[in-house]
Structures are given as C-alpha cells and as structure tokens.
Image: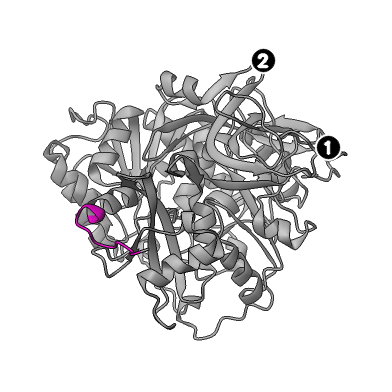
Amino acid sequence: MPLGSYICTRFIGYGDHETKHTVSDGKSAPTGNSVLNKPVCQAFSNNSETSMSVLHTGSRRCLQVEICMSILRPGSIASRRSSTASPLTLSAVEGPLHPPLVSQTLPEYFNRVILANHAERPALICRRERPRPYGGPRSHNLGVEKHLAWNFGEFNVNIKALARGLVGLGVKKGDRVGVIMGNNSAYAMLQWACASIGAILVTLNPAYRLPELVKTLSLVEVSHLFVVPRIRSSEYLSLLANAFPSLRNSAPGAIQEPELPALRHLIVVDNTPSFKEFELELDSIKPAVDFREILLWGEHSSEERQVKELQGSLHHDDIINLQFTRTGIAAGSPIPIALMKRLVERMNLRELTIAYGMTETSPVSFQTTVDDPLIKRVETVGKVQPHVKAKIVNAQGEVVPINTPGELHVAGYMLQKGYWNDEPQTRKVMQIDDKGTLWMHTGDEAIMDDEGYLRIVGRIKDIIIRGGENLFPVQIENVLTAHVAILEAAVVSVPDLRYGEVVGAWIVRDPHKPSVSREQVRNIVAEGMNPQNAPAWVWFVGEDGEAELPKTASGKVMKHVLRKWSKTLAEKGVGRVMS
C-alpha cells in the first residue's frame, strides 16, 4: 500500500508513527506522535466555531461527532499508566491527569502550528496519483516527478481551493457532505476543507450495497455526495444511474430524487484508467460534477489528464524484508494469542501494542505499552488512557471485584455526542450516574486484574449461555487458533433444546497442514479448556456451504450472520459432533 494510502491517518503525520484523528464530543485527537514528533491527546470542549464535524456510518447507526485537534503541552510525555499505586480490589480505574489537555480546532492547529512551523515538510504522498491531478499552480512536489507529493504549504493551497469550491456549490455550515471513495488525495483534502467551513463530513462505507447506501444518505440528509466511479468491483455511478433514472435527466444542483430528498449535488472524482472513459462516465449520469471543476483553478492541460501507470509493487516481490519492522498497533477485535505470537516472531514486531476502544469513544481508551510484560501485551489490552475513567459492572450496575467479568463502561473527554437523530439509542448506551459522570456502556464483557490491566472476554451479546453457564467465544477461539492446523476460528451460539445454547465453531483449516476432523476440533477445546466449552457443532469454511467467513470491510467477523448460518445448518443436521 502506498505511503499516501492511509490518508485519514498519515496525511498530517511525519516520521515513523501514524497520526490518527479520532472523534469526541467537540474534539479530536491524534494517537501516536504528531507532526512535531510530540505526544498528543484529546480534550473536551464545546466552544469551537470551526471544529470538524464527522458522521461515521455503519451497519447499526450513524454517530454524530465534532472534531478538533487537541495536543499536549510541549515536552510532555503521555503516560498510559494508571494512577493507582496500590493493588486494586474493585474493577474501577482512572487514567492519569498528566499531561494536561490543551484544545485547538483542526483548522487552528493546522494554521498556527503546522503551517507556521512545518510548511516545507512532507504532508501527503500518493504513489498512485500523478502530480497536479486537479490542475492548479505548479508545485515543487517535493522534487518528485512520477507521483503526487505535497508539502504542507502545497497541501494547504489545495485545501483552500477545495473549500472555496464547496462554498461555491452551496455547502454551508452544518450541511452533510458524503464521501464514497478509497484512499486518495481528494479524501484527504475533503477532511480539512469541510472542517474549515464547518460542514459535516459523512464517511460512507465503500462496502455498502445500494439499500444500505440509500438508507444512510436519507437518514443523515446528505446534500453533496463525492464519489469515485468504482472501487474494486463496485461501480457506484452505474449503480446510482440504474437505480434512479431521474438522475439521468437532472441538472447539477437541482437533483430531484424522491428516495434521496436532500441530495442536490453529485461530484465525481476521476480514478479511471483514461480521461475519455471518465467523460463517458460523467455523460451517463447528467447531474454529476467533475471534481476538478470545483477547485476553481481555471486551467486544465491535456497532460494533466493522462494517467501514468506505476510499475512495480511490493505485492509482486517474492521476498519482503521485515528485519526493520519494529512496532505497530493491533486493534479492531480481540487478537488471538497465537496470532500475536506470529506477529512478533515472523514480522519482528517486538514493540507491537494492542489498543482497545470503539468509534463512539474516539476510539482508544485502553492500550498496552512496549514496556509492559510480554504476557500482558499478549493477553490484555493494557491499562486505561490518560484522562479516561473505566469500570466493570454487573447487571445491576454495581462495580464488580477484580478478576470478575462484567460490562465495561468508560467515561471522559473522548465520548461521542450521540447517535444521529436517535435519541432513544443514545440514552440507552450513554447514561449519567449520581455523581454527574456520563458513561458509555460498551457492550463488551471484560475482566480487570489488580494492576488495572484489562482483558476483553467478548461482546455481551455473543456470550454463549449453556445450561446457565456463561461461555466466552474469544477464549474458545484462542484455544482453537493455537493449533497448527487451524488458520482461523469463529465461535457462536447454537440453539439447543436441552441446554438452551451450545457452542458452534466455524473453522478455516490450513491447507498446508494435516487436516483436522470435527471430532478433533471438539477434543482440542475439551482438552485445552473443559468439555462444557467444547463445540457441539463444527463447520469447515469452504466445505459446509460457505466459501468464507462473513466479515465487515474492516475485517471483523460478523457473528450475527454466523449465528443465522449456524442455525440453518444445525436444523439440517449438518456439522453435529458426536460427544
């Protein structure tokens, strides 16, 4: 993947560490190191007039957030250690209050810190884009001839041009601007341009099918939609044109589609192999506006329209040298212990850390450090972050003793504002206690030890209740994936007349290792844990009717889909393991 591919995380970063903007109630924060190579953190504030607003859209609902930059006092060192000096007895912790939080909006930070001190430093590199893809003034391009390479000064010129273009299209403060595209310079520019004019950026999942896309666009009332003609096998322009014939006859700025009542502008970003093909794409759907037209450069030379195919890729190399890899962050879902060991041993990631969080919490609230004991870095998600509170509670909302499972709640500056136009769901998961603290109910089952290290057991809704006993899928999956013949495992509940629920396991076998049978899979768990956790049903991916595990665009296994598959196969008697 090219350096510029991580546009949401790298485009203001510099050096070896990535800088990620996360979301909060009014504020955003990078995780890792800033462009100044200084630790950064988030802050809680609501007094900004120019904070960046973002809507994160997913399969469940849309999250309403406002973003700004928050940095630590220069010279500060961000400690992830809990302020607790003595061993804990209850599962409740508060992160340290040092270093203090200092709030700035993203535009303020960009202008006062980045441009003022680092205008000549590299900002955005896109190896799959030609220099000056949108026209505009000649740029130094960091001395690179074959692809786009902007310093912060050049990046800022393009951001301002795009911001003026957005205003020219009628985008106002608070308007929702939708984005369906992969990693490219246009996406990076939109992040900052929307922030500078107070528009709300709606990041749409490229994996959406048409019904999901239409539902989301209508729900958040997107007025301006930026889209690339295609991403992988999804052809968005053709999809929209075929689904909504009215788009073929609409005029730019005057779209009238009953199913998309708020949509007025469709802006297409050129990612096609040839300009002629791009013109045909635009001609097929009349209200589409060429992205370059809104940059207001006033010049378009023919050479700018030629796409140069870059030769060579790491993906084509037979051997990749990993001796210089050192660190990274693993997150998104529980990391199997066997996978962690492989990452450390095979990829040389000796300083790999694990982070835990959720989009609603900006996202990281717990993380290991490179100084943690190896066993803690492998089996836990570390300790609570600075300025964050966390507790584990039972069904009655009472804090549980250490080493006792319960639901994890978190509080602090990093919480979302709420779910977009969904006050009931917001009230359900965000509640104020008798001390006035607002807590986010994560829905994750967790266990905390006496040092404050957190272990995620799994999603509460994924817990298997077998005959009144709680079984945790993550623990079973860890045992299964530790076996040399099993590449991947996903465990779900299966309805059972006798026990209520029993364990069902989906297995991805390693084709290069001796094959394991259903009975062997059951025995692996029975011997590694106990018979209660052993799967009563086992299905092999690619053999029992499904070619691959169902996953989200970010690679998480969709357990709700697996439960449906499992129930259907179990009703047919497929996959039963004799005990």
Q: Look at the numbered disc 2 and give the secondary structure of its residue.
A: loop
- Please state if 348 lies on the left or on the right of 99 as rendered: left
Closer to us: 306 or 358: 358
Q: Which stretch appears magenta?
A: 569-578
Q: Which residue is mark 2?
A: 436
- Residue 575 forms part of the magenta stretch: yes
Above or below, comparing residue 58 to residue 546 in the picture: above
Q: Disc 2 and disc 1: Cα gap in Å?
A: 22 Å
**Label 2: how many Cα within 10 Å (few below 14, some 14–19, many 20+):** few
Quarter of the image where one finds residue 246:
top left
**Which residue lies at the image location 29% right of the left edge and 69% below the top edge?**
542
Above or below, comparing residue 481 to residue 381 in the picture: below
| For marks 2 and 1 on the same chain, the one whose residue lies earlier in the sequence | 1
Task: Report the colour scheme.
Answer: one colour
- Residue 419 forms part of the magenta stretch: no
Q: Which residue is mark 1?
A: 84
- Determine the main secondary structure of the stretch shown in magenta: loop
Closer to us: 420 or 258: 420
Residue 141 placement (x, y as % from top left): 58, 61
Q: Amino acid at mark 2?
A: Gly
Q: Amino acid at mark 1?
A: Thr
Quarter of the image where one finds residue 233:
bottom left
Closer to us: 493 or 219: 493
